[in-house]
Amino acid sequence: MVSRVATRRILEERDDVVTICLPLFLAGGQKERDFAKNNPCITVDGCDKMCAAKGVEMYGKVHPKSSIAISEITKKEKHSKPKSKSRIEPEDEKLVHETMKIINKEVDKVKEEE
Amino acid sequence: MSMEKKVAIAVCTGMDQPLATVSRYAGYHVLEKLRPDKTVLLCTPALIGGVQEDVTFAKENPVLVIDGCGEKCCEKIVNEAKGQVKAIINVEDVLKEHRDLQPESRAKLGPKGMKLAGIVGELAARKVDEILGDVNKGGR
């Protein structure tokens, strides 16, 4: 949930990022896979299983420019783990903001390298 | 005594479309409110990532898929992992029967979208009961 909400807010704030539909990408969507091949890709995973990052590598044959995991941010910044699967509670907002800061930084870095 | 089976709910994890959000809210509704003791959430990206505990769970327990759109990605992913798909609900099909319940956006479903999620959730809860009824009768 934190991964999705933070990413969605970034998409609403910036006009130089887009999201690809991960399930469609994984299920064989050629347009999604071609897009990831032809554009720099940042993955934002919820946990340390890193399924988005692994999936992009395995099925898109693309090495993400950056891979972010919320579980790492939680550990590093000593945030408590969000309790709800279905909503962001007020106490989770700090973690969402922290994640957004990291995504923004990574996007800027990728853009500079371009 | 055999372990009691639970139904694994696979929801759409896409971010592009409001119908994906409806799929997820419907899934949470079943998991948290309607059938909390009979269901667990299946992580579909983990199936593709080959995370063994998730793959094993999908193989050993009946799976109810709630797909968001006609691409049917969830169904494809669970089938690819050789999971036991026992029932499929597609939010797009449900919306066709309730055309007035168009969700507002992918971030905010609004009252109509939430009502649609509630209807999909109720439908899913009935499917859970049917699946577990079959399992108890000795079906796979």
Image (tube, coloured by chain):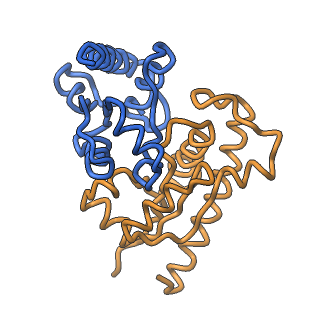
Chain colours: A blue, B orange
Frontmost residue, A56 versus A103:
A56
On screen, residue A46 versus residue B83, left or right, reads left
Residue A22: % across, % down: 42, 43
Residue A33: % across, % down: 40, 45
Frontmost residue, A59 versus B33:
A59
The residue that appears at 31% across and 18% down in the rendered structure is A107
Instruction: Establish if B127 lies above or below B40.
Output: below
Instruction: Establish if B139 lies above or below B77.
Output: below
Q: Report the number of discs.
A: 0
The residue that appears at 75% across and 34% down in the rendered structure is B112
Q: Quadrant of the N terminus of chain B?
A: bottom left
Instruction: Establish if A65 lies above or below A32.
Output: above
The residue that appears at 48% across and 62% down in the rendered structure is B76
Can you tell which quarter of the image residue A77 is in?
top left
Which residue is most to the left? A76
On screen, residue B132 versus residue B97, left or right, reads left
Frontmost residue, B39 versus B93:
B93
Residue B114: % across, % down: 68, 37
On screen, residue A5 versus residue B66, left or right, reads left
Residue B32: % across, % down: 51, 46
